[in-house]
Amino acid sequence: MELHGRVIELSDEQALEAKEIYNQAIAERLTGKPTQYIIGSAPFRYLEYEVGPGVLIPRPETESLVDEVLHQLNTFADPVSLVDLGSGTGAIAISIASETAGKKLVHIVAVERSQEAIPWLERNIAKHDVNVRVVKEDVVAALEGIKCDVVVANPPYLPDGAQIPQELNFEPSEALFGGPANGMEAPLKFIVAAARLLKTGGLFAIEHNELQGPLIARELATDFETIALHRDLTDRPRFTTARRK
């Protein structure tokens, strides 16, 4: 067996075990099971996150949202308070914590209600040894009475019944589907929560699909200003930022 250019000698028993693991992985992949679930990890920006059934796999398009949030954090004086709504694996919160460490003082809270996702979130926080506090509540009522500088969110936003690739059927539907018709039911709850949590001038960043930008902007108009639509790495309009009035 060759690994990273080095030949590794395996015993017959080890070779048989490796073959069985390989064949099992192939069999699972043929069912449509995501590769990330099979190997138990997924990359996001500069880190690897543990993933598995019950938690949404972090995706490259969300990296652009993190870039923009990191850029706009520089407009706030230290310390900055940041809330990640519907944190899942913690990819957004942990990336921001990791990439601002030693550069900017950011107090981060990750809000997650899913009993299946919370263990993955806590595991990833421990793995990367970052200072992120977990709040196990629904975004609708989370952190009542608290005000913060920044809210980030990657809510469920696919319309109910949307045609999806086979492998998405393995991921939690509550993290994917945002409601009937245009899928805006869940994003609207996150917008209302952000308006409640943010201080005047606070930053809100929310991911959405390519068609929801105008709908998001319309919902933000009452409580937010400086509303801007942003494109991801493939030049698709995939997230919006705004400032609390």
Image: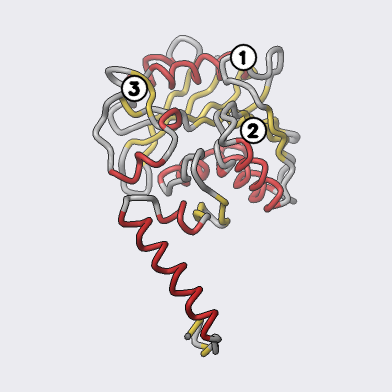
* Front in this rendered view, residue 50 or 12: 12
Is residue 210 toward the left or the right of residue 55 in the image? left
Mark 1–mark 2 distance (CA, rounded to whole Å): 14 Å
Question: Which residue shows up at 32% across the image and 48% down it?
Answer: 234
Question: Where on the picture, by quarter, is residue 145?
Answer: top right
Relative to residue 242, is residue 69 depicted above or below? below
- Secondary element under disc 1, as helix, strand or loop, is loop
Type of amino acid at the residue the image marks with label 1: Ala
Label 2 CA crowd tier, 10 Å (few <14, some 14–19, many 20+): many
Q: Amino acid at mark 2?
A: Ala
Q: Confirm or deny contact between disc 3 and disc 2 (CB under 8 A).
A: no
Which mark sits nearer the N-terminus, 3 or 1? Answer: 1
The residue carrying mark 1 is 141
Q: Secondary structure at mark 2?
A: strand
| Mark 3 vs mark 1, CA separation in Å | 21 Å
Q: Which residue is mark 3?
A: 183
Disc 2: which residue:
110
Give how far across and how far down residue 223 sits, in percent: 50, 12
Q: CA distance from mark 3 to mark 2?
A: 23 Å
Query: Is residue 70 something one can see in this rendering?
Result: no
